[in-house]
Amino acid sequence: MRPGYGFGPFTVLAELASGGMGRIYLARSPGGRLVAVKTLLNVGEDDRRRFAREVGLAQRVRGVYTASVVEADATAEVPWMATEYVPAPSLKDLVERCGPLAPRALYWVAAGMAEALVSLHTAGLVHRDVKPSNVLLPLDGPRVIDFGISQAHDVTRTEVALGTVAYAAPEQARGEPTTAASDVFSLGATLFHLAVGRAPYRDGGAGPALEQLVRAATGDLDVSGLPGELEPLVLPCLALDPADRPAPADVLAYCSARLEGGSDARREWLSPAWTAEIERHRRERLRAVEEARRQVDPEAPTGPVPAPGRTAALATAAAAPTGRGALPGPWARRPRLPWAVAAAVVVVTGALLAVVRPWEADGAIGAPVEPLRILEVESVRQGLCYPDKEWAQLPVGESPPPEGRSFTSDNRDECVVAKESGGMSVARFQDVRVVEAEGGGGWKVAVTFRDADRAAFAKLTGKVAAQPEPENQLAFVLGEDRLVSSFLIMSPLTGGNAEITGKFTRNQALALARALGAP
């Protein structure tokens, strides 16, 4: 569904996220209300029935701390459900960028999450996917999102467990029935993450999926590092026996008893870093919404939008995908780039299809927004590169990567270490184009090197193409440390043309093209 298409009365502005179960779009109503439209993929009759049942339950949820359902249609060709749009960062993003949460603020977040679970369970709905990335935090309190969808597309129980294993209850990981008590365990795991900076399973839930599943199924917990003040709140939620866990109403009562003060007390409970990040994210999202709205309706009057910051050219245009369970490392301060970091470079062998903005130029086009280097890759690992806070931890057995040639992807998923060899620099490209991938596989960015750079690029790709993985990759680095993408080189590229692919949305591809020098 591209910008301008619709779900019922809602017009799509942009794609926010996608996953194995569906896609999420930013859309607006005829009156201008913003919603997040969640769709279901791989639709069969059983899927439709489950989806319709869960939508019916979700529409009954009216909690203050949930993103309420606005409208839905389970009978549409692509079943969809529109919920309130909340322009706020997730708990996962906040911990990664700003570090763990102080106990008093954690009680406030826990109370809101517990109240949300009370609302869900009262409506007869079990969330089954409570985790830091499914809780948004505006300044007026947390919002639990994605309820209903997680149950609607019910693939095998093992696959469901693998998708949420770092915060899943042991019974869920074993494929047993998931109950309200399972949500309480996931609540406790999320609170532990807020307090410590990692999931409560051994090794923080990192490692191969099968190892994660075994740890969860056997209840192999490591709760070291949890402040003693928070143990009475968090540890009962992590009880291995579901019968020993408190009810959400009990968690709410416990937290409420420790929260005294007016409605503005949250500004004192949250650290300045958390408050500033929440405000920055809100402004950035509203700016992105305005940009998306103008693309759909360019003649509409411009609404009030905050002034762009120094990195406005690289402002986030879509929500980042959920992380892959790696331990959080440093709390990066830069805004996210709106494109995925994993990509592939292939030779352009035919005519470009569906060119959106050809940016024809009589000579060279604009230079990249910052100096661009193309570097050989030495190693790649999950997570962030540097523990720049005392409470940050690298995975067990790993040393900090070398400074100056280690780059964290802006979706926080990978740390790429470049080799000491100099690679090459690109002052400008001859051409940068956005094209639609064949077969509906998203969008890509095609670049053409200038004559002066073609031989160097061909030599560099020939050098790495024969290397074992991950040394058969190149990294595009803007400025000192801004990793644009890492590229898998399958064969030498001798024609001076290359395509950067990664199933980008149109907006993501446009933003990447501009960063590489397109006007």
Image: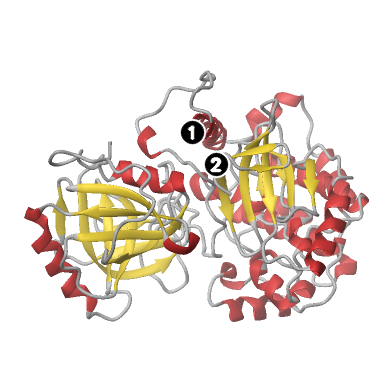
Looking at the rendered structure, the number of numbered marks drawn on it comes to 2
Sequence order check, earlier mark of 1 and 2 = 2
| Residue neighbourhood size for the residue with mark 2, other residues' Cα within 10 Å, grouped as few (<14), some (14–19), many (≥20) | many
Q: Amino acid at mark 1?
A: Gln
Using the image, tell me which numbered label, if any, was put on residue 295.
1
Classify mark 1: helix, strand or loop: helix
Identify the residue position indicated by label 2 in the image. Answer: 3
Q: How is the image coloured?
A: secondary structure
Give percent across and percent down for residue 207: 53, 75
Q: Amino acid at mark 2?
A: Pro
Classify mark 2: helix, strand or loop: loop
Give percent across and percent down for residue 262: 77, 24
Q: Is residue 272 left or right of residue 519?
A: right
Quarter-of-image position of residue 260: top right
Give percent across and percent down for residue 405: 25, 59
- The residue that appears at 24% across and 45% down in the rendered structure is 479
Q: Is residue 430 left or right of residue 231?
A: left
Distance Cα–Cα, label 1 vs label 2: 8 Å
- The residue that appears at 76% across and 46% down in the rendered structure is 113
Give percent across and percent down for residue 271: 57, 36
**In which quadrant is the C terminus drawn?**
top left
- The residue that appears at 25% across and 61% down in the rendered structure is 498
Quarter-of-image position of residue 63: top right
Query: Tags 1 and 2 in contact by the CB under 8 Å rule?
Result: yes
- The residue that appears at 82% across and 77% down in the rendered structure is 176
Can residue 397 be seen at all in this image of the molecule?
yes
Q: Is 413 above or below relative to 509?
A: below
